[in-house]
Structures are given as structure tokens and as C-alpha cells.
């Protein structure tokens, strides 16, 4: 069975990523052929990258890195739920990506973003990073506007069309994750 992690890309107080990740999880979990899991970066408490050796060596000194490595290695694909901060992804997400390398390789990723412009600029930068990690990112991504998909900018109430987009994205992610799992064997 495929295992796909829904990675919440924000650790801020009053963040929206928990609401969005739960919505993704509820819809995604209707698919019997895949196991989905929400991964909260708060649970890993990664400091600013501090491993003495480059991640490509796969030789980690710190227990928090080993724990993060094990989690990411156990997954076949990823859905990154990310806000857009200052035309980019949150620093905590970039930091978590940079901690490891091989664990990301030959897997698939999809994006659910939110912000005043739907988070599209955060996703643009994430797509560039995915290429370096040898992650195949799918074409369709969900872009949520804080003006139309959140009530009073705080309570997540997605436009109904977003569920259709999410399902298209999930179809693509599952297809690519399946193909790449076979390659990793």
C-alpha cells in the first residue's frame, strides 16, 4: 500500500495549515488504495540545519535528524501544505527539506498552497527544490485564496470547486507515487 505524507509547512501560532491539512486528509482518506498521514513539523522540532556532514552522505549525528529521516524515508509521496510568506515558502519548511537528501529521492510530490495570491509563488520555489531532490512533482496543485477560501481570513471554508481540483491532484500524485515506488524497488 502506498504511504503519502501530508506535510504541514508552517509552525506559526494561529497557522492555517492545520485546517487545510485536515481538509486534504479527510478527502484523501476516502481512497482505499493509499494510506495518508498528516506530518506536523512542530512534532520534529528541527533547529536551523546543524548536521556536520552534508545530507547527501546520509550520516546523521543528531537524533532529531534521524527521526525526521526515518519518517520521510517511510513515505512514497508527499503533499506539501504551505502558506506563502513574502513570495516564498516558510523558512521552517525549507529548513526541514534541507536536513535530509536521499530520503526524498525518486518519490512524487503535490502542493496545496494558500495566501493572498493562492500561495503560487511558494509553490514555484518548491518545484525548483523538488527537481534537486529528484522528486517528481505533479502538474495540478490546489491554490487557496485567503479572500475566498477563508471566512474572515481565519476560518477555512474552501470553495466547492477546490475539492475537484484536490481530487485531480490526488489522482496524479497516486499515479506517480506508484510508478516511482516500482522504480525504487
Image (cartoon, rainbow, N blue to C red):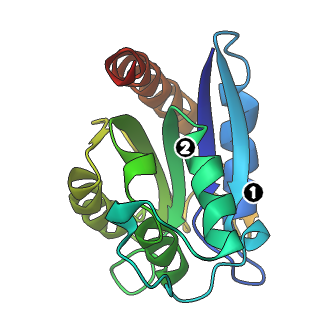
Residue 182 in the figure: left or right of residue 4? left
Residue 118: give x, y in percent of width and height. 42, 62
Q: Say above or below: 109 vs 36.
A: below
Distance between the alpha carbons at the discs numbered 1 and 2: 25 Å
Name which residue lies at 62% across and 73% down: 10
Mark 2: which secondary structure?
helix
Q: Earlier in the sequence, mark 1 or mark 2?
A: 1
Can you tell which of label 1 and label 2 is closer to the viewer?
2
Quarter containing the C terminus: top left
Name which residue lies at 22% across and 57% down: 132
Number of disc labels = 2
Q: Circle 2 sits on which residue?
A: 73
Disc ID at residue 114: none
Q: Say above or below: 129 vs 23.
A: below
Nearer the observer, 112 or 100: 100
Residue 112: give x, y in percent of width and height. 49, 50
Residue 22: give x, y in percent of width and height. 76, 46
Query: Can you see residue 156?
Result: no
Q: Circle 1 sits on which residue?
A: 19
Dividing the picture into quadrants, the one containing residue 23 is: top right
Residue 33 in the figure: left or right of residue 168? right
Amino acid at each position: 500500500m502506498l504511504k503519502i505524507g501530508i506535510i504541514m509547512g508552517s509552525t506559526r501560532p494561529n497557522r492555517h495549515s492545520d485546517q487545510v491539512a485536515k481538509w486534504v486528509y479527510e478527502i484523501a482518506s476516502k481512497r482505499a488504495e493509499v494510506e495518508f498521514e498528516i506530518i506536523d513539523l512542530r512534532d520534529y522540532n528541527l533547529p536551523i540545519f546543524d548536521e556536520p556532514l552534508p545530507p547527501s552522505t546520509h550520516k546523521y549525528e543528531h537524533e532529531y535528524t534521524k527521526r525526521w529521516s526515518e519518517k520521510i524515508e517511510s513515505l512514497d509521496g508527499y503533499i506539501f501544505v504551505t502558506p506563502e510568506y513574502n513570495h516564498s515558502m516558510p523558512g521552517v519548511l525549507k529548513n526541514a527539506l534541507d536536513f535530509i537528501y536521499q530520503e526524498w529521492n525518486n518519490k512524487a510530490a503535490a502542493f496545496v498552497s494558500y495566501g493572498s495570491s493562492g500561495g503560487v509563488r511558494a509553490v514555484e520555489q518548491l518545484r525548483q527544490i523538488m527537481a534537486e531532490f529528484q522528486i517528481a512533482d505533479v502538474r495540478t496543485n490546489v491554490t487557496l485564496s485567503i479572500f475566498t477560501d477563508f471566512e474572515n481570513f481565519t476560518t477555512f471554508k474552501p470553495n466547492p470547486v477546490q475539492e475537484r481540483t484536490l481530487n485531480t491532484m490526488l489522482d496524479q500524485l497516486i499515479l506517480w507515487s506508484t510508478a516511482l515506488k516500482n522504480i525504487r524497488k
